[in-house]
Image (spheres, rainbow, N blue to C red):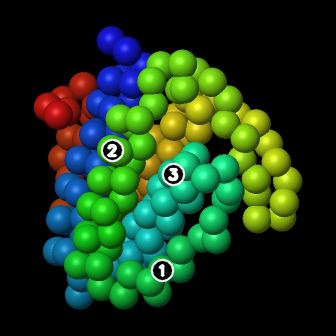
């Protein structure tokens, strides 16, 4: 398996899990926990966007605000758009690109160099953390997402 196909599979799992959780968040739309779910999903989307944009441009963009996604439907649409952009980015990276370095300039003007695979892994692990938080919140509300383990992903 190439590094490219490895990361394409892991990101497919990331998007699949996000979509499963988005579908369940709809079931708690009229509860107090919805606001927390919305904030968490908005943060996850902003982070996915930020790292992708930084990889594409070398510049850290400003974070997206939660109020840019006022509805669950806007979040769903925005995640699908982000998924498409990540798919294009991953398809453009070969194994040497993934193993190579990316220079990223922060909003404060500091430039740092990271191996691309570490950035890709950061996006995935960050997503996993927030997926777990959302799963816990939803489970407490009686809407468990069930088994989210990667081993059972059929992507």
Q: Considering the numbered disc 3 on the image, is that residue within a helix, a strand or a loop?
A: helix
Tell me what residue is drawn at x 23 percent, y 78 percent: 73
Residue 128 visible? The answer is: no
Q: Is residue 1 above or below residue 146?
A: above
Q: Quadrant of the N terminus?
A: top left
Q: Is residue 153 above or below residue 86?
A: above
Work out whether residue 135 or residue 115 is closer to the camera in this orientation and state it: 115
Q: Nearer the viewer, mark 3 or mark 1?
A: 3
Tell me what residue is drawn at x 40 percent, y 67 percent: 41
Mark 2 or mark 3: whose residue is earlier in sequence: 3
Tell me what residue is drawn at x 79 percent, y 42 percent: 112
Q: Quadrant of the C terminus?
A: top left
Q: Residue 99, how many percent across, how many down?
A: 58, 21
- The quarter of the picture where residue 143 lies is bottom left
Mark 3 or mark 1: whose residue is earlier in sequence: 3
Q: Is residue 14 above or below residue 24?
A: above
Q: CA distance from mark 2 to mark 3?
A: 10 Å
């Amino acid at each position: 398996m190439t590094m490219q196909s490895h990361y394409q599979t892991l990101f497919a799992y990331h998007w699949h899990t996000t979509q499963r959780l988005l579908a369940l968040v709809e079931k708690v739309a009229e509860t107090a926990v919805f606001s927390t779910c919305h904030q968490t999903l908005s943060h996850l989307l902003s982070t996915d966007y930020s790292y992708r944009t930084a990889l594409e441009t070398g510049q850290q963009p400003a974070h997206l605000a939660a109020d840019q996604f006022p509805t669950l439907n806007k979040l769903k649409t925005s995640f699908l758009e982000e998924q498409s952009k990540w798919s294009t980015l991953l398809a453009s990276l070969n194994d040497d690109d993934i193993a190579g370095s990316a220079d990223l300039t922060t909003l404060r003007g500091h430039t740092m160099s990271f191996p691309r695979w570490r950035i890709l892994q950061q996006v995935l692990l960050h997503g996993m953390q927030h997926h777990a938080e959302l799963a816990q919140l939803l489970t407490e509300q009686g809407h468990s997402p069930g088994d989210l383990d990667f081993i059972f992903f059929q992507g």
